[in-house]
Amino acid sequence: MKSIISVDKLTKKFSGLNAVDEISFDVKEGEFFGFVGPNGAGKTTTINMLCTLIRPTAGTANVAGYDVASQSSKVRENIGLVFQDTTLDDRLTAWENLEFHSVVYHVPARERKQRIDHVFDLVELSNHKNDVISTFSGGMKRRLEVARGLLHSPRVLFLDEPTIGLDPQTRRRIWDYLARLRSETNMTIFLTTHYLDEAEPCDRVGIIDHGKLIVIDTPNALKSRVGADVIHLSTTDDEKMKNLLETKYDVTVKDVKGELAFEKENAEEFLIRVVEDFKPYLTSIGVRRPTLDDVFLKLTGREIRDEDVPPKHSMSSIASRVKGGR
Amino acid sequence: MDLEAIYIIWLRDLKINWRDRGNLIGALVRSVLWLVVLGLGLRAGFRSVGGVTFSQYIFPGIIGMTILFAAVQSAISIVWEREFGFLRELLIAPIPRTSITIGKTLSGATWATLQGTVVLALAPVVGVSLTVTQVLLTLLLMLLISVTLTGIGIIIASRIVTFQGFGVIVNVILMPMFFLSTAIFPLPWLPDWLKAIIMANPLTYAVDLLRLVTIGLYDFPLMLDLGLTIGLCIILTTAATFLFVKEI
Ligand SMILES: Nc1ncnc2c1ncn2[C@@H]1O[C@H](COP(=O)(O)OP(=O)(O)OP(=O)(O)O)[C@@H](O)[C@H]1O
Ligand SMILES: [Mg+2]
């Protein structure tokens, strides 16, 4: 498959701070790509460059076949955007917001009504079409923004932290819409998040920290870098089982907190075998897989939502926020 | 140029202005009060100029004030849009920036002309009788002046960051522009130093044109009025477009 986004040594400097530092990557057409990193990592800055909102300091980026610096209008025609902060018109109704969008994005007049109705259905807001946005809750606004981003059938949909500040149900719903969208169209989705668990369904995940792209791979491959899956079980006779397991499967079994545990590749499939072999002795059995949080911890040495930024970074980023702040 | 985009931007602005009923009523009440209260209150002290009453004299000035406030208010909503994020939706759209400025200029001008027309309809109340030609000419003039004033509004909007600034703008720019024109005070009444300031105020020439068309009085030659008003319209609209294109 061909690349729909290709980024080469893309860099953005804000008064001395490298918000984005020579990142290079490709996203394939139809891919569900997650960009993950802690606050201030450079996610929004990267999206802003890809969406032609800000100019790169150095490097190039190509989106949907067009250069973001020299063909910004063409790029814009082909992308949908859901920003981190709302960009709806508070004083218009939901319908008027979408109508406005469909006109400035050149949706053919004949198709407008039908497309608007379709996206309203998708995000389950059909009953609120004629409500003014100022009466919407945060979750409703976000859903409407997703709908608006889809209205002109973009080839790439960019979502900057689409679920931030939303309750678990609404988060769930947004993910459901995206899943549905992916099953129905071949749209490429590029999203950023700092909830690593949200990045699980992505085809590939890039982890960014302090403006640098640390790693990029499928969630499974990333997790296997941290370690294999672990099968853990409690039994009627731990001592005897430990020996049986070790001789039969050639693994090292550890006794952790009153449970037996051993590492195994493709643990979920292997589980069935263990159950078949030892059913009478088992009282419970399960698989624990490394999470993307473990990956982040291993690669950066800290938790993703660790607010304790190392001192040398915190000073410089505070200074730059003050200077660059609007 | 993207005609449909210009149209939808224009339409949206008008919808929003129209829905802000409090603001609209406030603006119209302000104009009527100025016209009626000031006109009646100062009638006695008014040494007749060109055989008109004071209410008649300030009538074109009040039209000028009405369109000044309406146009700037409409354009200044850009600040609001920037603060609440909508401006980004507009700026990121695949349309030329000039379409955005044109749409905004036209909506401000339409809105100001509509309000000016309401005041114009009060002509019989103050005893000004107008022919159809006069009405048409006034409408045309109002449109021209409103375009200029919207341009001023857009320039202001590109300079101020928060919406709180609007109160300051009213006091520091709009009120002085209104008072330091010939809107209320006949030029011959004034000391020379004040005349100098008034002659530096572009609104003076716009009011002079409106006065010429509605009640036949004027302070400056027609060609000067027209030249300055049209020239300024072109300069300010260009400047506004340029500043807006630079946004983000
Ligand atoms: N306009 C600006 N001027 C100066 N510095 C900026 C500007 N925009 C962003 N930065 C800095 O660039 C760095 C990256 O910011 P960015 O908004 O891209 O982070 P992010 O990954 O999106 O974070 P978050 O999760 O908080 O949204 C931060 O240190 C930020 O302070
Ligand atoms: Mg961000």
Image (spheres, helix red, strand yellow):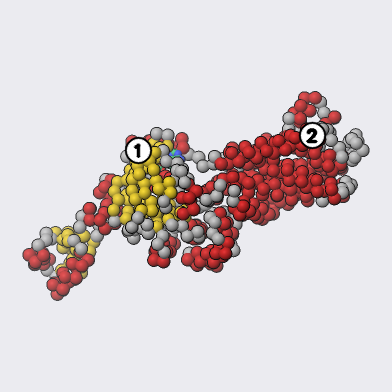
Q: CA distance from mark 2 to mark 1?
A: 64 Å
- Looking at the image, residue B221 sits to the left or right of residue A255; the answer is right
Indicate the position of residue B39 as horizontal and vertical percent values.
85, 42
Using the rendered image of the protein, determine whether residue A241 is visible from the camera's viewpoint.
Answer: yes
Instruction: Residue under label 1, please give it.
Output: A313
Closer to us: mark 2 or mark 1?
Answer: 2
Residue drawn at point x = 73 percent, y = 43 percent = B144
- The kind of residue on which mark 2 rests is Met
Q: Is residue A190 above or below residue A300?
A: below
Q: Secondary structure at mark 2?
A: helix
Q: Is residue A74 above or below residue A58?
A: below
Instruction: Residue under label 2, please give it.
Output: B223
Of all chains, the one bearing label 2 is B
Residue drawn at point x = 60 percent, y = 57 percent = A92
**Location of ligand 1 given as a quarter of the image:** top left
Indicate the position of residue B196 as horizontal and vertical percent values.
76, 26
Q: Is residue B71 above or below residue A133?
A: above
Dot 2 alpha-carbon crowd within 10 angstroms: few under 14, some 14 to 19, many 20 or more: few
- Among the 4 quarters of the image, the one containing residue A196: bottom left
Q: Residue furthest top?
A: B192
Of all chains, the one bearing label 1 is A
Residue drawn at point x = 14 percent, y = 59 percent = A254
- Looking at the image, residue B65 sits to the left or right of residue A288; the answer is right
Q: Is residue B212 above or below residue A118?
A: above
- The kind of residue on which mark 1 rests is His
Q: Does the residue tagged 2 have its C-beta within 8 Å of any atom of ligand 1?
A: no
